[in-house]
Amino acid sequence: MPEGHTIHRLALDHRERFLDREIRVSSPQGRFAASAALLDGRPLTAAEAHGKHLFLGFPGGDWVHVHLGLFGKLDFATAPVPPPTDTVRLRLATPTDCADLRGPTTCALITEDDKRAVHDRLGPDPLRDDDPEPAWTRVSRSRSTVAALLMDQKVVAGVGNVYRAEVLFRHGIDPYRTGRDLGRAVWDALWADLVALMREGVRNNRIDTVRPEHTPEAMGRPPRVDDHGGEVYVYRRDRRPCHVCGDEIRTAGLAARNLFWCPTCQPTTVGTG
């Protein structure tokens, strides 16, 4: 599932291609056809992201709510705009650009009130100007592991498996440490790092988390080869040597996803920090 930086990048791409331009809206697949007909010929007035949710705004307070889920794809093309395939749920098109949405978990025409309800059930997003205090309130009272809390979209919106694993490694935090044992200073440092890392992810359209001294060039090691791209410390590196200490990266299931960590660089701790 795409992480929050990808959705914010998609919002930016929509603004650059379609904002304030009259758009042809269609649903070649047919499942969004009635709603597409209501939007056809109207301009895009906004494109926003909150966590893993994309919102495309149209005049009159109408919004297209998109959640890609595990299998959704959103692709762009430029002139000559190709004809759509019959798997396209939603197409936005101008004479020079098009965006094709396939296989999303959610593609729905919603109202302003509906949109607010989605925002209300999500936690603060490191890529928005959100107040992070509600996230800390939930974390500091929770007996759940910090690894589980970071993946809970009601706590922090937009963090997925890669950012979870990497930010915990970067701060030497045992992923099984409970939220209430984390400590405010440690949480503030985690949040600030997520903001910086995810902003870089939007700029580069990929996740890179290694510090300069641990890049392939600095260490004389081969670059990472993975369909997720980017240089990382622990994500999908189970049974391989840690870039920092050389010990073996471990993996285990947690919150229905695979967790990756280095037991040496992220030792078991008790108490607050």
Image (tube, rainbow, N blue to C red):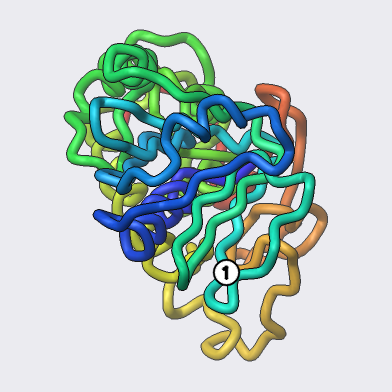
Q: Is residue 260 visible?
A: no
Q: Residue at x 50, y 45 (%)?
A: 25
Estimate the x, y position of residue 35 in percent, counting from the top left. Answer: 51, 27
Q: Residue at x 33, y 51 (%)?
A: 193
Q: Is residue 81 visible?
A: yes
In the picture, measured across the screen, residue 8 lies left or right of residue 215, that is left
Q: Quadrant of the N terminus?
A: top right
What amino acid is at disc 1?
Ala
Up the image or down, 218 lies above or below 185; here it is below
SS of the residue under disc 1: strand
Q: Residue at x 47, y 9 (%)?
A: 143
Estimate the x, y position of residue 7 in percent, counting from the top left. Answer: 46, 47
Estimate the x, y position of residue 179 in percent, counting from the top left. Answer: 42, 20
Residue 13: quarter of image: bottom left
Estimate the x, y position of residue 29 in percent, counting from the top left. Answer: 73, 38
User: How many marks can you see?
Assistant: 1
Front-lying residue, 98 or 42: 42
Q: Residue at x 45, y 62 (%)?
A: 94
In the picture, measured across the screen, residue 114 lies left or right of residue 90, that is left
Residue 204: quarter of image: bottom left
Up the image or down, 253 lies above or below 48; here it is above
- Residue with the mark numbered 1: 77
How many other residues sit within 10 Å of disc 1, few (<14), some (14-19) or many (≥20)? few
Up the image or down, 247 lies above or below 267; here it is below
